[in-house]
Image (cartoon, rainbow, N blue to C red):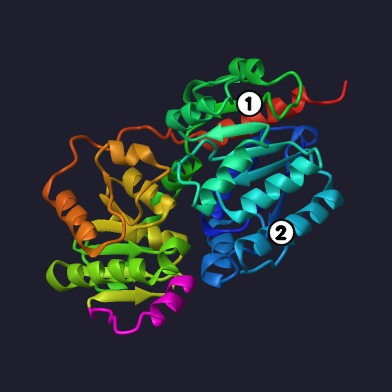
Amino acid sequence: MELVHVVGARPQFIKMAAVSRAIAAFNYQTQPENRIKEITVHTGQHYDHGLSQVFFEELHIPKPKYNLNVGSASHGVQTGEMLKRVERTLLDEQPDLVLVYGDTNSTLAGALAAAKLNIPVAHVEAGLRSYRKHMPEEVNRVLTDHVSSILFCPSNLAVDNLRQEGKAHPFCDGRRVNEEDIQELIPEEHSVDNSLVINVGDVMYDHLLHSLAHTEEHAGILEELDLKQGAYYLATVHRASNTDCPNRLQGILHALNELAEYRARVVFPVHPRTRKALTRLRGTKVHPNVHLLDPVSYYEMLSLERYARLILTDSGGVQKEAFLLGVRCVTLREETEWRETVDAGWNILAGTTTESILDAATRLEDVEPAQAPPEVYGDGRAAEYITRVLKAWAISHEAP
């Protein structure tokens, strides 16, 4: 079996690292003729060294065979250019399957290019919904799910979302899956309307468990910044809906300034888009206790998350990592695709006004969540289940 990973942004590199590691483990125990061959296509959506190359180096991800160097552009232009270049690559490679991750333009372009060439698509992190169609990420994930042949869901809620959209056959709890279950779940014949929907758990949880041992090695960033465990806030802002709207970005920055003035230091790794947007905010100063950093490596970010007093973010991945690490989180949005984190009391959707952000931070700090983070994202073996399903699916689709 030959599969192509289509990736282009930081969160996708992390998810792919978990899957690629599981494929390598499978191949190590398998005869050469039965191994899974991987090819990585990097669209170039994230091209800054701190958001791209450093992750391939640090996470030991297979080097991309293709780097499409698409770069930044409007959503339509960027997605169209990706679609054109991914299609050309798939025509050259003729893979058995294309694997896409998450909700970016890279994911949509990879899925559409494959689907139009009648190459089956597997979507890792399928079924997430914010139910806000104005979000480009929501459009990307919905369209990708509906052209995919295999939908790997991170939770039961994601499965339920797909069930409501008519993706109802068949379902399985990936945490209890075995070889017999997998064989029974594989559709007899490939069809977009007969997709395999399966809860395998969350691959980012796999990678987080794998990576925790490395956080101590990179905890030196706390010493470099003179931070004490549990005595600082961690903030990230990168979504265009926040960075490109001066009122929202100003509301967030005022809240961070207030926290830094009266409560504790704020550590703020700044996305390149956000740094440009901050320079356009006239008359708004950054408090001296708000420490603006260049993007940090994965392990450094994990260390900062693990030991933070509270996290403030508009990132879906950081929300979820905070939850898995048992760190309370204020989400700088009015919706989230990771609803389980809110329902469990570890995450508050604050929006972007200064008052709502400060109120959410106060509530989370004053009241301990009623329970430890529940195990709603699997058992840390999602990538292993994905690999087993892919192999079983490939066997079921071999020519007689």
Residue 91: x and y in percent read 85, 50
Q: 36 or 7: which is nearer to us? A: 7
Q: Which mark is residue 73?
A: none
The type of residue carrying mark 1 is: Leu
Tally of numbered tags: 2
Q: 391 or 283: which is nearer to us? A: 283
- Against 234, residue 398 (above or below) is above
Residue 379: x and y in percent read 43, 32
The type of residue carrying mark 2 is: Gly
Residue at left 37%, top 47%?
Answer: 335
Select label 1 or label 2 by which is in front: 2
Locate residue 324 relative to residue 101 in the image: left or right. left
Residue holding disc 1 = 196
Locate residue 343 relative to residue 115 in the image: left or right. left
Element at label 1: strand
Residue holding disc 2 = 80
Element at label 2: helix
